[in-house]
Amino acid sequence: MKIQKAGYAALLASTLLLIGGCDQAEKAAQQMLSKTAEAAKQAIDDTHKAAEQALNDATGGRLIEQQPPAEENKETSHTI
């Protein structure tokens, strides 16, 4: 019986160690994903800034006149 109890204790201890290792791996993966998401956000922000600068350079700093939304276009076409 003592051997059987020792076997159960060893199995329980190894299971706890395995679960602890899984928690560590999960935390590391979450940190990696967080860093990757932040890097992707920074790349998108940098690309947006570069696109705005390129548009500003191309238009000479003038704003491009925007067309009204489609709903407003429908209303004006019905009055004609």
Image: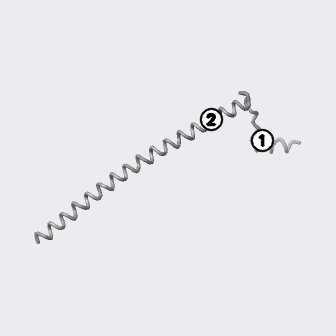
Could you classify mark 1 by the number of other residues whose Cα lies within 10 Å: few (under 14), some (14-19), or many (20 or more)?
A: few
Closest to the camera, between mark 2 and mark 1, is 2
Q: Quadrant of the C terminus?
A: top right
For the image, the number of numbered tags is 2
Coordinates of residue 47 in the picture (x, y in percent): 60, 38
**Left or right side of 9 for 64:** right
**Left or right side of 18 for 35:** right
Coordinates of residue 27 in the picture (x, y in percent): 36, 49
- Give the residue at x 22% y 62%: 12
Point out the residue furthest to the top here.
Answer: 61
Q: Vertical placement of 18 versus 56: above or below?
A: below
Q: Quadrant of the N terminus?
A: bottom left
Could you classify mark 2 by the number of other residues whose Cα lies within 10 Å: few (under 14), some (14-19), or many (20 or more)?
A: few
Point out the residue furthest to the bottom here.
Answer: 1
Q: Secondary structure at mark 1?
A: helix
Coordinates of residue 24 in the picture (x, y in percent): 33, 51
The residue that label 1 is drawn on is 72
> Alpha-carbon distance for marks 2 and 1?
32 Å
- Give the residue at x 45% y 43%: 35
Q: Nearer the viewer, residue 13 or 75?
A: 13
Inspect the image, locate mark 1, and give the three-letter code of the amino acid beneath it: Glu
The residue that label 2 is drawn on is 50
**Left or right side of 48 for 62:** right
Coordinates of residue 45 in the picture (x, y in percent): 57, 37
Per the rendering, the mark at residue 20 is: none
Indicate which disc, 2 or 1, sits on the residue closer to the N terminus.
Answer: 2
Point out the residue furthest to the right here.
Answer: 80
Inspect the image, locate mark 2, and give the three-letter code of the amino acid beneath it: Ala
- Give the residue at x 61% y 37%: 48
- Give the residue at x 40% y 46%: 31
Q: Secondary structure at mark 2?
A: helix
